[in-house]
Image (tube, grey):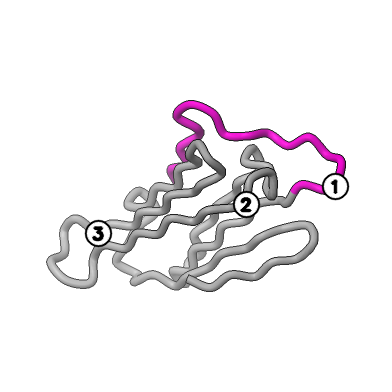
Amino acid sequence: MTTQSSCAMHTFSVTLQRSILPEMITVSAKKGDRLDVVADAWHMERDCHYEWQIRFAPGDVDMATVRAQLGSDGKLSIEVQRCLPGQTCSPCTGMGLRYRF
């Protein structure tokens, strides 16, 4: 997974096998400014499970702005807006959001 960061946003991207369909991907925003990403092609035996845990510095991102997209080329992109100085951002509390495609 590659990472690009700017003053306004963090972007994460990875190209998955074309056999991994949108319903096989889960992006979960977790307590403690963390994203868990799981892509699992349950019908395959090899090269079928991918998992990432992305941790942000406390107060760095607005967890309410997590956006994920799977392109037709198999590229999974996840964007999270960063908090601007003096801005109150939405922390992820409790179970957080669960992003299914």
Q: In this rendering, would 60 be left or right of 2?
A: right
Tag on residue 41? 3
The residue singled out by tag 2 in the image is 57
Position of residue 27 relative to residue 11, above or below, is: above
Residue at mark 2 to residue at mark 3: CA–CA distance: 31 Å
The residue singled out by tag 1 in the image is 85
Amino acid type at image mark 3 = Ala
The front one of 36 and 24 is 36
x and y, in percent, of residue 62 in the image: 68, 42
Residue 49: say if magenta: no
Residue drawn at 16 percent across, 71 percent down: 46
Residue drawn at 68 percent across, 34 percent down: 90
Range of magenta residues? 83-101
Residue drawn at 71 percent across, 51 percent down: 81
Q: Earlier in the sequence, mark 1 or mark 3?
A: 3
Q: Residue furthest top?
A: 94
Residue at mark 1 to residue at mark 3: CA–CA distance: 41 Å
